[in-house]
Amino acid sequence: MTFTTTSLFHASTLAPARALELRQRVETFHADYCATLDSGSLEDWPEFFTEKGIYRVTARENAELSLPVGLVYCEGKGMLQDRAVAINRTQMFAPRYMLHLVTNTRVTAEEADGAIKAQANFLLMQTLVEGPTTVHMAGTYHDVFVVEGDRLLLKDRQVIYDSTIIANDLVYPV
């Protein structure tokens, strides 16, 4: 069987001034998103998505081969809320601190319907309460944002992680 790989890089189709303006909004979104997760406010996490928002965590190898199989898949705010509540209220794992770092944000397109496509690299650090800080995951966010009211919300977030070997305790949202 032969597989064709797809590049995950998308060149920007925007004028530089518009790309910069939108990038500032996306970076503000990332700062709030990460602060919410890093503070442990997991039940607020779904509020960063539209009602029908999609959240996927996929290996880079699968994404490059256009294979839809992922590690985590949530479709709609209800599934996101279920995941957040389950993590928050049924913790069966060692306490930890998470720290999200997001960089190299690029806005690649603004669609006619107002959707904003963006990419950003992320690094997720984990510190077990009685252990060292380790790199938990690294990769790229591939996002589609929409504006609802005055808020930027995720219509689709595909988290593409780089390593083929990941920690078996991937619990928290990335």
Image (cartoon, rainbow, N blue to C red):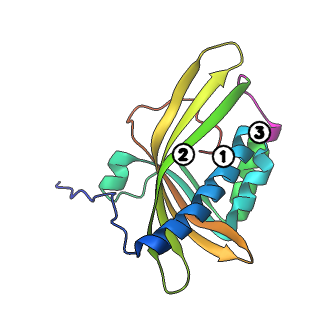
Question: Which amino acid, by three-letter code, is at mark 2?
Answer: Val
Q: Are marks 1 and 3 in contact (CB under 8 Å)?
A: no
Residue at left offset 55%, top offset 69%? 21
Disc 3 secondary structure class: loop
Q: CA distance from mark 3 to mark 2?
A: 17 Å
Mark whose residue sits in front, 1 or 3: 1
Residue 65 part of the magenta segment:
no
Q: Quadrant of residue 68?
A: bottom left
Residue at left offset 70%, top offset 52%? 32
Q: Nearer the viewer, residue 143 or 104?
A: 104
Q: Which residue is mark 3?
A: 40
Residue at left offset 73%, top offset 74%? 150
Q: Earlier in the sequence, mark 2 or mark 1?
A: 1
Q: Is residue 74 visible?
A: yes
Q: Earlier in the sequence, mark 3 or mark 2?
A: 3
Q: Quadrant of the C terminus?
A: top right
Q: Which residue is mark 2?
A: 102
Question: Which amino acid, by three-letter code, is at mark 3?
Answer: Gly
Vertical side of 26 occupied by 84: above or below: above
Q: Which residues are magenta?
A: 88-94
Q: Which residue is mark 1?
A: 34
Question: Which amino acid, by three-letter code, is at mark 1?
Answer: Cys
Q: Are marks 2 and 1 in contact (CB under 8 Å)?
A: yes
Where residue 148 sits: x, y (%)? 70, 76
Where residue 164 sits: x, y (%)? 37, 36
Q: Residues within 10 Å of mark 3 (few under 14, many from 20)?
A: some
Q: Earlier in the sequence, mark 1 or mark 3?
A: 1
Where residue 22 sits: x, y (%)? 55, 69
* Direction right: furthest residue: 89
Q: Nearer the viewer, residue 116 or 64?
A: 116
Q: Residues within 10 Å of mark 1 (few under 14, many from 20)?
A: many
Q: Is residue 54 visible?
A: no
